[in-house]
Image (cartoon, rainbow, N blue to C red):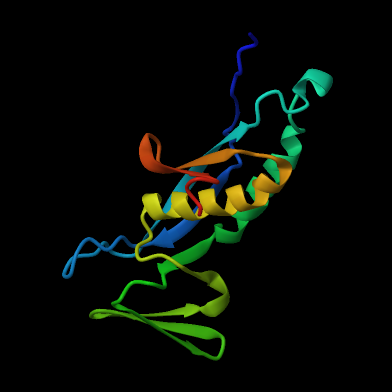
Amino acid sequence: MKRKSQTTLHLFKQNFKFSSAHFLIFDEKRAEKLHGHNYQVRVDIVVPPEYEMEKKGYFIDFNVFKKAIKARLDVWDEMVLLPAKHKDMKIKKKGPSLEVNFRDRFYVFPANEVHLLPITNTSVEQLAGLLAQDFFTQFKKMGVLEVQVRVEETRGQGASCVCSSSTTR
């Protein structure tokens, strides 16, 4: 009987990074001050067993994934990331600016330097979740079974999220 194996591709390149400003919201009263991180990202991709690998010897050229990952991370690079779904986040577009009220804070940012994310907090947990969903949606068309994304805000401190067909229903 032939044993089935599972192959996971590991992509963790130096340029899989983005530098962004954010603040974490802890509870009803406390939140961090606006600050930034140089985030580093790792992507693990589970491919189907024996997916044409017996013929070609590999699943797909790594460059296909690397270009897609880098392009996606570049969208958040040098941006302010804000959680659009947090109940205390009030955002108003005024011409080329975004006025942001968060509790007793008031910010004005150039609108083209802000990403309003469909999350409740700009934590590494939620950032990893967004990226994992995005990458899985894009890569499943190539036959990928699962994508795990790890986002580190500082070396050795981060979170990961796994997306597969069974987790994205």
11 horizontally vs 91: left or right: right
2 horizontally vs 156: left or right: right
Outermost residue on the front side: it is 1
Outermost residue on the left side: it is 29
Point 67% across, 53% down: residue: 71
Outermost residue on the right side: it is 55
Assign the N terminus to one quadrant of the image: top right
Q: Is residue 138 above or below residue 99?
A: above
**Location of residue 136 in the rendering, given as x and y in whole percent from the top left corner:** 59, 48
Question: Which quarter of the picture shows residue 88?
Answer: bottom left
113 horizontally vs 51: left or right: left
- In terms of depth relative to the viewer, which is nearer, 49 or 133? 49
Number of numbered markers: 0
Q: Is residue 39 above or below residue 75?
A: above
Outermost residue on the top side: it is 1
Point 35% across, 39% down: residue: 157
- In terms of depth relative to the viewer, which is nearer, 151 or 143? 143
- In terms of depth relative to the viewer, which is nearer, 73 or 113? 73
Point 52% across, 64% down: residue: 79
**Location of residue 115 in the rendering, given as x and y in whole percent from the top left corner:** 51, 69
**Location of residue 154 in the rendering, given as x and y in whole percent from the top left corner:** 39, 42
80 horizontally vs 136: left or right: left
**Location of residue 102 in the rendering, given as x and y in whole percent from the top left corner:** 30, 77
Q: Is residue 5 above or below residue 81?
A: above
Q: Is residue 169 above or below residue 120?
A: above
